[in-house]
Amino acid sequence: MQPLQTTSLRVVDNHLFILDQQALPQQKQWLPASTVEELVGHIHALRVRGAPLIGLSASLLLALLAEQGANRDQLAQALETLRAARPTAVNLMNNLDRMKRALTQEHFVAALTAEALRLIDEDKQLCDNIAVAGSALVTPGSRLLTHCNTGGLATAGVGTALGVIALAHQQGNVANVWVDETRPLLQGGRLTAWELGELGVPYQLITDSMAASLMAKGLVDAVWVGADRIAANGDVANKIGTYSLAVLAKFHHVPFYVAAPQTTLDPHCPNGDAIPIEQRAAGEVTGVAGSFGAVNWAPENAAVYNPAFDVTPAALISGWVLDSGVVTPSDVANGIFQLH
Ligand code: MRU
């Protein structure tokens, strides 16, 4: 495969490398992801994360394994193992469905490579289209609030919600971005703050519990978040804490936008109740660990509940900003996300 470089994926000499998103922002280190076990380990540890990126990394690895001589059965097995790496973001399943079709082709090695590269190129274009559609909704002087990380780190392109914010900033319309730190794994505090800094976008980091008082004071003009899965009725699974923001936004009459590519749509999933929600390890809640070190503050063996995502009901969403344009609540009520 030709050499390839995105913000957080790299192919060099036919091998996949990932930018370790657990080490950022203190360290910028690239790690090999040469085997299924290695990549699944990175995905479990959130060294590779973000709905689009998970699917793209898995697709690239499959193509590289094919080029290295894996046979059809081995690739089919690898595909199923990768598909099970994380349950909530549907981009992984959607991308791997396309790779599975490529695997049935007579010249499956070439077909898998072509499909993986197509997915990367498409994702870049999807991000650009989302940014254009979304930035049109950002009014001059906007103070925007975002959650988790939806930028170039999480995609092959400029990102989803963060791509909208970056373009709106270039257009001169962003006064400030409130960045939720995003407990428990701090994707906002570590990754979004870093990306906005690199882009020169003005931001202020807040703890998740500060959003309510900011909205009450009239300091938030809109909330922009990404998505891990959009169900047929418009319900959205995204990083834990998204739902509370949507409730707050509704109460304070602040528009709440979800930005996502078509690879995040799941028309087979009727509503949010049917979206599988990943449960994660207790240690993520009882302490924090990263390149800055590790600390535990809870009592030893404290009982913990740690869902990685929550579901925001469609009724709380002002607009679904897709690569195809802005979907309104009445579009959703008319079944735009349903199978036809
Ligand atoms: O657990 P993570 O960090 O993979 O969760 C990421 C999110 O929830 C993002 O908002 C979502 O994947 C969209 S990324 C463009």
Image (tube, helix red, strand yellow):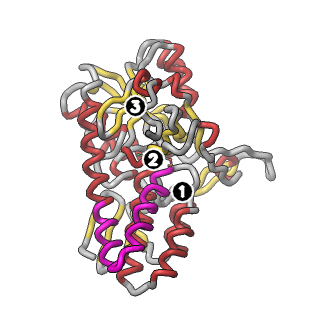
Residue at horizontal 53%, vertical 41%?
Answer: 239
Query: Considering only order in the chain, which callout, 1 or 2, is on the residue closer to the N terminus?
Result: 2
Magenta-highlighted residues? 90-118
Q: Which mark is residue 320?
A: 3
Q: Which residue is mark 2?
A: 190
Q: Dot 3 surroundings within 10 Å: few (below 14), some, or many (20 or more)?
A: many
Given the image, on which type of amino acid does mark 1 rest? Answer: Gly
Please, what is the dominant secondary structure of the magenta stretch? helix
Q: Quadrant of residue 209?
A: top right
Say which element carries label 2: helix
Q: Earlier in the sequence, mark 1 or mark 3?
A: 1
Instruction: Tell me the kind of residue under disc 3.
Output: Trp
Q: CA distance from mark 1 to mark 3?
A: 33 Å
Label 2 and label 1: CA atoms lie apart by 10 Å
Instruction: Name the side, left or right, on which 8 lies relative to 181.
Output: left
Kindly tell me whether mark 2's CB lies below 8 Å from ligand 1. Answer: no
Point out the frontmost of discs 2 and 3.
Answer: 3
- Is 240 in front, or is 201? 240
Number of numbered markers: 3
Q: Residue furthest left?
A: 171
Residue contact between numbered discs 2 and 3, judged by CB atoms under 8 Å: no
Amino acid residing under circle 2: Arg
Q: What is the secondary structure assignment of the residue under circle 1?
A: strand
Q: Tag on residue 290? A: 1
Density class for disc 1 (Cα within 10 Å; few <14, some 14-19, many ≥20) is some
Where residue 197 sits: x, y (%)? 31, 42
